[in-house]
Amino acid sequence: MDRRTLIKNLALAVGGAVLLPSCLHPDGTTYIKLKHINIDADQEKLITDMCETLIPKTNTPGAKDLHLPAFVLKMIDDCYGKKDQQAFLAGLRKFTEMVKTKHNSSFSDLSVKDREAVLIDIENSAKPKDGAKAPARKPRPQKHLQADPLMAFYWAIKQQTIFAYTTSQYFMTKLVFYDMVPGRYNVHYPVSKLKLA
Amino acid sequence: MANLNIDSVKARTFDAIVIGSGISGGWAAKELTGHGLKTLVLERGRDVKHIKDYPTTNKFPWEFEHHGQLPAAVTEANPIASRCYAFGEDSAHFFVKDNEHPYIQDKPFDWIRGYQVGGKSLLWARQTQRWSDFDFEGPARDGFAVDWPIRYKDIAPWYSYVEKFAGIAGNKDGIPELPDGEFLPGYPLNDVEVYFSEHLKKNYKNRHVISARCAHLSKPNQIHIDQGRTQCQNRDLCQRGCPFGGYFSSNASTMPWAEKSGNMTLRPFSVVESIIYDDKLGKATGVRIVDTKTKETIEYYAKIIFVNAAAINTNLVLLNSTSSRFPNGFGNDSGVLGKYIAFHNYSAHIGAEYDGMKEWTVDGRSPTGGYIPRFRNVYKQETNFLRGYACGFGGYRYQQHKYDGVGSSLKEGLVKGELSPWYVGSHMMGETIPKESNHVSLDTKLKDEWGVPLLRMNIDYDDNDEKMKKDYIEQLTEMFTSAGFKNIQPSTNHQAPGLDIHEMGGARMGKDPKTSILNEWNQVHACKNVFVTDGACMTSTSCQNPSLTYMAITARAADYAVSELKKGNI
């Protein structure tokens, strides 16, 4: 093998982090140019706050610290088909109205506790269709969204936020160990010796 | 000018031409150059150099634009390629996109292709089980297709030959229907796989779970180190191309070896339009290619030609090589060219849970899994369908995370999690019966951008496949139930032929020129300096993954071609 090339590649892989084409609004929220869907500044703020409600800053970084909202928006813009995106946008409007009617406030102006309650209410009202099955081995977002707009919107944001978080460099290097080159396969391995995060 | 022409012809003349650089073409290139033949290797796609041209190989998930997910624009534009399990953000550059080389589906056919040096050898599942005489004698015993002109004893030394070079991990299992080979240490079965293996041994006759033999360097020998390859690092990212050369591909192994001989000329971006036949000489004199970039037509000449364009495209090349001698396609005196195409039936799965061995798991990753060799109709006909199926089998556990809720409890759930119980799963790999009606042909009007007629696909399942599928579900359900597996979930799908990526036949080998295209040395019956040694040559499909057999057949045919050339017979 060409060791030098290999070492160089490995060094590149370790050193390089992906740069999302994102920048900051004056108010500090992440801004990302979308190609397929239109999201206005308020809606972007709403989604950002939803991401932060799902993955808040605690003693470890939250969604905003890790620039997850920009990635979530990028995924929704790139990785769903037109029909799903329309359901998503309809759900986004429905969600906004629902919060307004119930709380006479925008989602972003709610307290953290109220924001959490809004999301948990939706989550409890309907689980995603595969909720009954064994949990997925990897938290990959579903390829297609549910037909109900509110559910399409909520689960798209939740699944993409979880995906963004669990595949982020921070998560995969600081919170769990992504073992890219195990170099081993041991069978009959005691569970007690396994390093679960 | 005359001299210039002579020089030009000379520059375009070689001892041998190999069409294709995939798993069999790479072997043809290595063997022919190894015998000192100046060899031109034609590849319709781009060059892919080992390591250098594996752009994603060392990327972490977060370094991909969509962290590994494919954009909807890609999946919507490529419904066929998207159905392949290996098509992802990390490997899409090695797949032919649906619109890049269209074909006509008279019946649905998912044609999965890799147009580049190395072809699909970069993407294959690396499973390498030998055939036995239970397979080679199948058509004669069960009365379908035609008798294979070779038997296990003819191919056995060549299996050994290619296994030693490619590097095959496996155990000596002593099972007559799946002969042992020249193995590097096998990857072990895990606890639940061993448990199921022992269960079958105790309760069934001739049913085994073995560690599937695979083309991975579990412990490299000097010959592998000489190729610049090193031990498989259990990354399980093979579809990206392996920087360690841990698995066998043309790119990591045969192609650089052929290049090192100094006898190979590699010409990428070269679509072969046809093989040139000379009526007076009574043999092929070369091939006509179209440069995919300049669209220029160029002729190359050689004493022998190896056709390794991948099964369906080999049929295309032969069907399109017409002359006054062969008005219906190259070597097609029998009329069977393009017919009797078969594949593997992968349309059934089964999954279950095992509530035991909770204190044991695995550490690291295995590049292979369990394999249940064919147990149906092996020693005698015993069911209402012909032939049988092999089964993949694997047991696994994983860390279960909680995705419920929001906030800090969700964060915690994503990091922490308990180990799941053991899950087990199996998939069916069924033999299909070659039939005249399963065929490919050339469209009479439509052509691709290189002026080659488009292919029409007419390949389908039959009643035998349906019965076999039903039997797989019944047998596996019974075996899983008696093993104490719970929550057994069989599933079938209607995946189109082709998605198994084991399409075979169309230019089958046989004893009789009236019913086959190739003889026992893979020579075209009617034109002895043309050899076909990829999947197109297969008389029947058996149920083992076919690549190892292509490699062995190719090395054997190349050796014969060289000796015939030396004797002046071709």
Image (spheres, grey):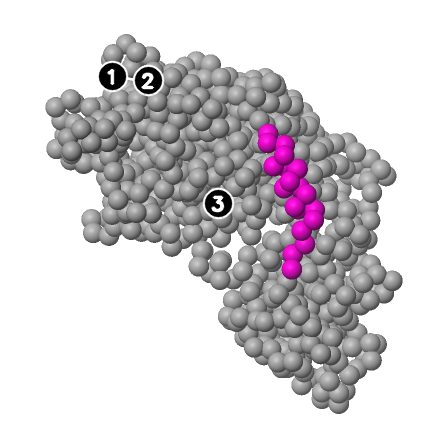
Q: Are marks 2 and 1 in contact (CB under 8 Å)?
A: yes
Residue carrying label 3: B94
Residue carrying label 2: B561
- Where residue A165 sits, quadrant-wise, is bottom right
Q: State the extent of the magenta-drawn residues as a range.
A: A1-19
Q: Is residue B61 above or below residue B136?
A: below
Residue carrying label 1: B570
Callout 1: 10 Å neighbours few (<14), some, many (20+)?
some
Taking the view exactly as shown, the residue that stands out farthest to the top is B567
Instruction: Give A93 or B202, whichever is nearer the viewer.
Output: A93
Q: Are marks 2 and 1 on the same chain?
A: yes
Dot 2 falls on which chain?
A: B
Residue A109 visible in this rendered orientation of the protein:
yes
Instruction: Give B521 or B402, whichever is nearer the viewer.
Output: B521
- Residue drawn at the location 45% of the way across and 17% of the way down: B158
Check disc 2 and give the amino acid type. Ala
First along the sequence among labels 3 and 1: 3
